[in-house]
């Protein structure tokens, strides 16, 4: 009995065996490319590391924040 999966990156048929070192990927290249793309997307999430947004995470800043005042809403 053999199990075959599709490579998540290129869709190639991969036999799920001990010999399939890179399963579920068909090759090391596909695994690295796919993981690389995943990590790139993680880093690309906007606002996560944006220093200009940190002030609103502070309780004092939130307490003094006035939505109707243009001088504090930039
Ligand atoms: Zn592949």
Image (cartoon, rainbow, N blue to C red):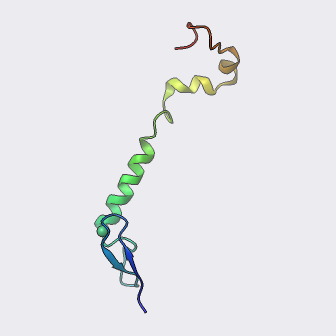
| 30 relative position to 63: left or right | left
Is the residue 2 above or below the residue 66 in the image? below
Q: Position of residue 63 (x, y in %)?
A: 71, 18
Is the residue 48 above or below the residue 25 in the image? above
Residue 28 vs residue 45, the one in the foreground? 45
| 54 relative position to 58: left or right | left
| 2 relative position to 71: left or right | left
Residue shown at 67% from the left, 21% from the top: 62
Residue 6 vs residue 16, the one in the foreground? 6
Residue shown at 32% from the left, 68% from the top: 11
Residue 40 vs residue 6, the one in the foreground? 6
Q: Quadrant of residue 55?
A: top right
Ligand number 1: quarter of image: bottom left
Residue shown at 65% from the left, 15% from the top: 65
Q: Quadrant of residue 72?
A: top right
**Number of marks in the rendered image:** 0
Q: Quick one: which residue is furthest to the bottom in this view? A: 1
Q: Position of residue 19 (x, y in %)?
A: 36, 84
Residue shown at 41% from the left, 51% from the top: 39
The N terminus: image quadrant = bottom left
Q: Position of residue 71 (x, y in %)?
A: 56, 6
| 51 relative position to 16: left or right | right
Q: Position of residue 74 (x, y in %)?
A: 52, 14
Is the residue 12 above or below the residue 69 in the image? below
């Amino acid at each position: 009995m053999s199990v075959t999966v599709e490579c998540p990156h290129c869709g190639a048929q991969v036999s799920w065996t001990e010999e399939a070192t890179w399963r579920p990927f068909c090759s090391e290249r596909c695994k690295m490319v796919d993981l690389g793309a995943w990590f790139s997307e993680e880093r690309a999430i906007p606002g996560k590391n944006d220093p200009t947004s940190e002030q609103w995470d502070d309780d004092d800043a939130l307490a003094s924040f006035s939505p109707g005042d243009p001088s504090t809403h930039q």
